[in-house]
Amino acid sequence: MIIKLVSTVKLKEHLTDGIFRLTLYAPEIARISKPGQFVNVKVSDYFDPLLRRPFSICDVDGEYIKLIFNITGKGTKILAELEPGDEIDLLGPLGRGFEVDDDFDVALIVAGGLGVAPFPFLVKILKEKGKRIVSYVGARTKEQVVFDGLENVNVATDDGSAGFKGTVVELVKLSILNLDSSKIKIFGCGPTPMLKSLVKLCDEYNLKCEVSVETAMACGTGLCQGCVVTTRDFNYKLACKDGPVFNVREILI
């Protein structure tokens, strides 16, 4: 079920370095959302920006959903200027989320930059299911590291200003040597180069892995056919409808 509603901003938080979190009153969407799904946000009542913007559902708290974003253009700048009491048009929940009921004991959360967005919600559900959780968060610098809502957090920064100096996938590779790979499932989200490295690692160690892909979306419902993801058998799927979460054995990144 896809719901269209006008939501009210309850809280705006400036987390760090141009990164914001909005808490929105959206009971109908909150009630049926699953980790990994997203909402399409109409950021303006005018024609500029024209298209809705997709945002992962960062967390659900009762009748509220949370979105996290950084300012990358006109649309996100408008969102960053919202204040409590302002209204915003939402469409969701959209897409396919993470599979949390298959056979694994240890969940490795791997986030690059704002790829952390879908994981507080996922961590909450994994904890309810009794899974052990280890989180890995990568960013360029310590100012860009966000890990609210995660468990057992390990940090990697490109410049070494916080945690491990290097990429988050390099940090994961060092860590999994001490874990039983047969009991692990990796959940990843981040820039495409990071996801490529993560898929290579999972192939090397034969690890279960799902990733949420980052790609441009227009309609969010599959009508425009604009967010094509190539499968390993050289067919295609749509990120907004068949994803944004995919088993890495299914797709080419």
Image (cartoon, grey):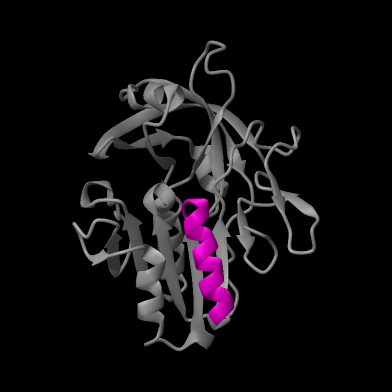
Seen in the image, is 154 located left or right of residue 59?
left
Quadrant, the N terminus: top right
From this viewpoint, which residue is outermost toward the top? 46
Q: 174 or 134, which is in the foreground?
A: 174
Q: Position of residue 129 (x, y in %)?
A: 47, 72
Residue 202 placement (x, y as % from top left): 54, 74
The residue lying at 39 percent from left, 55 percent from top is 120
Is residue 212 on the magenta stretch? no
Relative vertical location of residue 60 with respect to residue 171 in this rendering, above or below: above
Where residue 147 sits in the image (x, y, percent)? 30, 55
The residue depicted at 37 percent of the width and 87 percent of the height is 178
Pinpoint residue 55: horizontal percent, then vertical percent: 49, 39
Does the segment drawn in magenta span residue 199?
yes
Taking 225 as reference, is 107 above or below it? below
The answer to whether any part of residue 61 appears in the image is no
What residue is shown at x 33% (from left), y 31% (from top)?
A: 10
**Residue at image point 32% right, 66% down:** 151
Residue span colored magenta? 190-204
Residue 205, above or below 60: below
Where residue 218 sits, quadrant-wise, is: top right
**Toward the viewer: 70 or 1?**
70
Q: Is residue 30 above or below residue 85?
A: below
The kind of secondary structure the magenta stretch mainly shows is helix
